[in-house]
C-alpha cells in the first residue's frame, strides 16, 4: 500500500508538469489506474493499466522526440532526507510485464518513443526527477540492469550516455528540482498544481502513514 502511495505522488507530480508543457494535455492522456487519486479525474476502465505506461501523448514540440507518440512511465522511490541528495545510482524499480513489452515494442518503432522518469520522493513529499531514460529497452544490459525473474531495474555499473540523462543540475524549466511543498511551484509562475491539497498530501491518499 505504501508503494502504491509513492507511485501516485510521483504521477501527480509529472501530470502537473506535463499539463504546463504539452498543449491540450489532460486526463485522457493519463493511462494509469493511479489517475483515480485526482479528485477531478473521470472514472477509469478496469484494464487501463494494459498500456504499459502511465502517460501517452503526441509530442509535437520535441519535448522528448518530435512528431512521435510518447509513452511515458513514471517510477517513484522514497528517499529519506533532502531529494537534492538523491542519485540515479541508488534507484531501483519494478517493471510489469506490460511495461517491459511496451518498452520492447517502442524500441523498434518508427512512430512511438518510450521514456521512463525516475522520481525521488523525500521528506515532506518533495519530488525530484533524478534520471530520464530514453528508449530504456535499448539500454539493457550495458546501462540498465534487469533481473528477469522479478523485473527489477537499476543502473548497471559504469553507466553513461547515450540514452540516459542523470539529473544532477536540473534546468529551471522542467520537473527536476520542482518542489511540491509550500505555496507554489518554482519555475511555473507560482501556480499551485491541481490535485495537490494544501495539507501537502495528494488527494485520494489517506492522511495516516508515510510514503514508503
Image: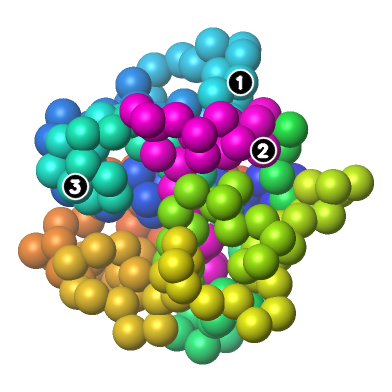
Q: Position of residue 73 (x, y in %)?
A: 50, 44
Q: Are marks 3 and 2 in contact (CB under 8 Å)?
A: no
Q: Position of residue 9 (x, y in %)?
A: 50, 52
Q: CA distance from mark 1 to mark 3?
A: 26 Å
Left or right: 72 with respect to 123?
A: left
Is residue 127 in view? Answer: no
Q: CA distance from mark 1 to mark 2?
A: 11 Å
Q: In the drawing, what numbered circle is on residue 176?
A: none
> Is residue 30 highlighted in magenta?
no
Magenta segment: 98-123
Q: Nearer the viewer, mark 1 or mark 2?
A: 2
- For label 1, the residue is 50
Q: Position of residue 181 (x, y in %)?
A: 36, 70
Q: Residue at x 28, y 33 (%)?
A: 68
How packed mark 1 is, by other alpha carbons closer than 10 Å (few <14, some 14-19, many 20 or more), is some
Between 111 and 118, the residue placed more toward the observer is 111
Mark 1 or mark 2: name the one nearer the start of the chain: 1
Q: In the drawing, what numbered circle is on residue 100?
A: 2
Between 21 and 162, the residue placed more toward the observer is 162
Mark 3 or mark 2: name the one nearer the start of the chain: 3
- For label 3, the residue is 62
Q: Nearer the viewer, mark 1 or mark 3?
A: 3
126 up-or-down from 194: above or below: below
Judging from the image, what secondary structure is the residue with disc 2 in? helix
Q: Position of residue 117 (x, y in %)?
A: 47, 56
Please, which residue is most extreme toward the right here?
A: 149
Mark 1 or mark 3: name the one nearer the start of the chain: 1
How packed mark 2 is, by other alpha carbons closer than 10 Å (few <14, some 14-19, many 20 or more), is some
Q: Residue at x 51, y 88 (%)?
A: 85
Amino acid at each position: 500500500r505504501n508503494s502504491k502511495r509513492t507511485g501516485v505522488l510521483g504521477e501527480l507530480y509529472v501530470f502537473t508538469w506535463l499539463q504546463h508543457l504539452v498543449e491540450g494535455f489532460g486526463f485522457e492522456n493519463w493511462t494509469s489506474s493511479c489517475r483515480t487519486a485526482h479528485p477531478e479525474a473521470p472514472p477509469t476502465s478496469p484494464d487501463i493499466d494494459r498500456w504499459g505506461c502511465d502517460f501517452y501523448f503526441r509530442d509535437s514540440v520535441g519535448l522528448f522526440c518530435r512528431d512521435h507518440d510518447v509513452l511515458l512511465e513514471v517510477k517513484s522511490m522514497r528517499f529519506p532526507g533532502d531529494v537534492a541528495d538523491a542519485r540515479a545510482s541508488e534507484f531501483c524499480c519494478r517493471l510489469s510485464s506490460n511495461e517491459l513489452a511496451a518498452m520492447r515494442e517502442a524500441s523498434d518503432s518508427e512512430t512511438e518513443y518510450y521514456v521512463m522518469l525516475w522520481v525521488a520522493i523525500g521528506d515532506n513529499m518533495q519530488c525530484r526527477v533524478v534520471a530520464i531514460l530514453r528508449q530504456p529497452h535499448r539500454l539493457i544490459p550495458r546501462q540498465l540492469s534487469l533481473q528477469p525473474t522479478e523485473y527489477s531495474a537499476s543502473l548497471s555499473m559504469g553507466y553513461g550516455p547515450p540514452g540516459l540523462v542523470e539529473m544532477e543540475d536540473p534546468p529551471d524549466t522542467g520537473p527536476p528540482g520542482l518542489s511540491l511543498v509550500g505555496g507554489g511551484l518554482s519555475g511555473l509562475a507560482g501556480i499551485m498544481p491541481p490535485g495537490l491539497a494544501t495539507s501537502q498530501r495528494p488527494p485520494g491518499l489517506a492522511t495516516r502513514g508515510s510514503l514508503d
